Image (spheres, helix red, strand yellow):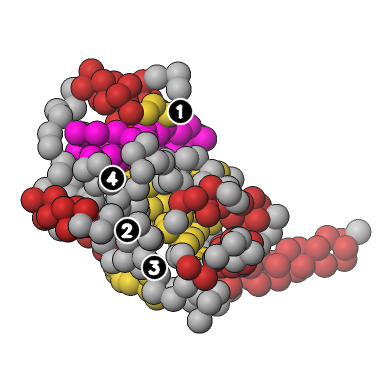
Amino acid sequence: MSKRRSFLKKLTLSTLTVSSISLPKAFASAGQARKPIVVSTWQHGLAANEAAWKILSKGGSALDAVEAGVMVTEADESNLSVGIGGLPDREGHVTLDACIMDETGNAGAVAALEDILHPISVARAVMEKTPHVMLVGSGARQFAIDQGFQPQNLLTERAKKEWEKWLETSHYEPVINIENHDTIGMVALDADGNLSGACTTSGLAYKMRGRVGDSPIIGAGLYVDNEVGAATATGLGEAVIKVCGSHLIVELMRQGLSPQEACETAIKRIARQKNSKDFQIGFLALNKKGEVGSYSLQPGFDYATYAGEKNKMTDVKSFYR
């Protein structure tokens, strides 16, 4: 019996010695998420990421970060596709769409909202202060005013001149990577491992009055599942709506695909749509590990990533080369 005890003691000491050996860094960090991290669509995502990172780097929530981030783009008058300064519909009205989704699955959205600078904040108010998910048109505007948002003219002189020039021919045709820079979509993973996302736009320039694209539609322009990941879309909204693009990507990630594989699969499905060579779609996805994926229909889409104190742009591979 004493020999057996001696053997067990030696085995225990040996095990402890092995377990105390320092593991290679790559092995030790396996399975750990890269967080916090924020990604957003297009070049204007760089400035948006800066605002989001100020919150994430201090331990703030992904929800607060994505709202603050896209608000930067909404307030940028030089941007012709989001917020103030956005190009109007064919009747000269600037109408804004936005949605937001948090880590609990709660969501809020507004569509065809006029005269309110920050539709993303109105969307968050819809999520947190009403029993609904989406408010539209005059009802959304009145709700915003009731919540303390101040109405203002969103049609800048630059956008007005562009619209008046367009009226000379009134020819409508979405232009790849020009008119389709119609969105900023942002998804983030915070230090606590929670995901949230936001998407905001003034929609396609010179659209029919009342047109709404994918950006304010949960599951199309944006979707978040805190168990799996998040995705957002940009481009011709009608094409994204037809495949419930962002939801599709998250569900593909749930089935085991990487963010990159999921984005590519969704784009290939859109490529089967009629005239797919004539418009642009870009997808951006982030999973719970902090892994990023992106893919577009046409060349020219890019996105911004802020992680590890670096904010950088990445060009995206495309289906049509």
Query: First in sequence: mark 4 or mark 1?
Result: 4
User: Closer to the observer: label 4 or label 1?
Assistant: 4
* Element type at mark 1: loop
Farthest residue in the bottom direction?
321
Q: Write down the residue under mark 4.
A: 89
Please rate how many residues cluster around mark 1, counting C-alpha atoms within 10 Å: few if below 14, some from 14 to 19, many from 20.
many
Image quadrant holding the N terminus, namely bottom right
Q: Write down the residue under mark 2.
A: 171
Residue at the (36%, 43%) spot, across then down: 208
| Distance from the alpha carbon under mark 4 to that under mark 1 | 24 Å
Residue at the (19%, 38%) spot, across then down: 117
Query: First in sequence: mark 3 or mark 1?
Result: 1
* Element type at mark 3: loop
Residue type, label 3: Ile
From the top left corner, tell me how far across and down residue 77 is, in percent: 14, 52
Query: First in sequence: mark 1 or mark 2?
Result: 1
Q: Write down the residue under mark 1.
A: 133
**Magenta segment:** 93-119
Taking the magenta stretch, the answer to whether it contains residue 103 is yes
Q: Is residue 203 above or below residue 141?
A: below
User: Closer to the observer: label 3 or label 1?
Assistant: 3
| Distance from the alpha carbon under mark 3 to that under mark 4 | 18 Å
Query: First in sequence: mark 2 or mark 4?
Result: 4
Residue at the (17%, 58%) spot, across then down: 165
Q: Is residue 137 above or below residue 234?
A: above
From the top left corner, tell me how far across and down residue 26 is, in percent: 54, 75
Q: Write down the residue under mark 3.
A: 176
Residue type, label 4: Asp
User: Closer to the observer: label 3 or label 2?
Assistant: 2
